[in-house]
Image (tube, rainbow, N blue to C red):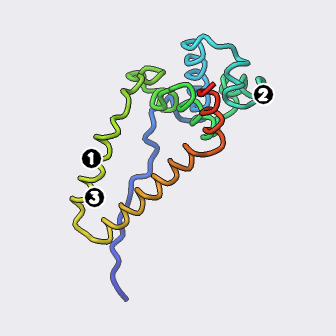
């Protein structure tokens, strides 16, 4: 029988005391309420963005109901909310993220090519190239889809 070394991992709850015993829903609800006040939106507007009924949104704000990850991603992408502030209750972050500078496409492509060139393993290099082709194809399919054609026709008029 082979000797197997057992390792012990500290699995104790390391969250701050105010985030334990069910207080997380209350903290998230309070932070969502703060986000709503920062934006100057009504409960109905926030519920519409989160694609839920206003009564359900009120329960999330009150902390009596948890929020699903899908709804947090809506807050992140649609409203620019900072998840460190919403979920982690870290007050060193602003409630909304700063607008990022526009993406420099040429520099992005250069960085990808340099990354592929610096990959030592042939298999990894091929994997990265195939991945990039797949992502590029998805992007083109999205750009050339029927929804984008509709916007192109509106621009021509």
Residue 26 vs 116, above or below: the answer is: above
Residue 77 vs 108, above or below: the answer is: above
Tell me what residue is drawn at x 46 percent, y 43 percent: 13
- Choose top left, top right, bottom left or bottom right for residue 133: bottom left
Q: Earlier in the sequence, mark 3 or mark 2?
A: 2
SS type, badge 1: helix
Query: Of 15 and 150, which appears nearest the observer?
Result: 150
SS type, badge 2: loop
Q: How far is disc 1 from disc 2 in space, using C-alphas?
A: 46 Å
Tell me what residue is drawn at x 63 percent, y 24 percent: 157
- Asked if residue 152 lies left or right of residue 118, the reply is right
- Asked if residue 2 lies left or right of residue 53, the reply is left
Query: Of 72 and 12, which appears nearest the observer?
Result: 72
As drawn, the label of residue 72 is none
Query: Of 117 and 62, which appears nearest the observer?
Result: 117
Q: How far is disc 1 from disc 3 in space, using C-alphas?
A: 10 Å
What residue is disc 1 on? Answer: 110
Image coordinates of residue 156 in percent, x first then y, are 60, 28
Image coordinates of residue 114 in percent, x first then y, are 23, 53
Q: How far is disc 3 from disc 2 in space, using C-alphas?
A: 48 Å
What residue is disc 3 on? Answer: 116
SS type, badge 3: helix
Mark 2 surroundings within 10 Å by alpha-carbon count, few (fewer than 14), some (14 through 19), many (20 or more): few
Q: Earlier in the sequence, mark 1 or mark 3?
A: 1
Number of marks in picture? 3
Residues marked 1 and 3 touching at CB (< 8 Å): no
Q: Earlier in the sequence, mark 1 or mark 2?
A: 2
What residue is disc 2 on? Answer: 53
- Asked if residue 43 lies left or right of residue 107, the reply is right
Mark 1 surroundings within 10 Å by alpha-carbon count, few (fewer than 14), some (14 through 19), many (20 or more): few
């Amino acid at each position: 029988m082979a000797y197997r070394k057992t390792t012990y991992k500290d699995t104790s709850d390391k969250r701050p005391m105010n985030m334990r015993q069910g207080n997380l829903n209350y903290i998230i609800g309070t932070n969502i309420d703060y986000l709503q006040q920062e934006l100057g939106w009504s409960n109905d507007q926030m519920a519409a963005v989160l694609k839920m009924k206003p009564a359900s949104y009120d329960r999330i704000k009150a902390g009596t109901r948890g929020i699903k990850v899908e709804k947090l991603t809506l807050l992140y992408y649609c409203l620019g909310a900072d998840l460190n502030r919403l979920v982690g209750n870290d007050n060193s972050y602003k409630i909304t993220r700063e607008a990022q500078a526009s993406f420099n496409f040429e520099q992005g492509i250069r960085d990808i090519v340099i990354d592929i060139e610096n990959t030592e393993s042939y298999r990894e290099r091929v994997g990265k190239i195939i991945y990039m082709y797949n992502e590029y194809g998805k992007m083109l399919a999205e750009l050339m889809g029927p929804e984008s054609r509709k916007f192109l026709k509106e621009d021509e008029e």
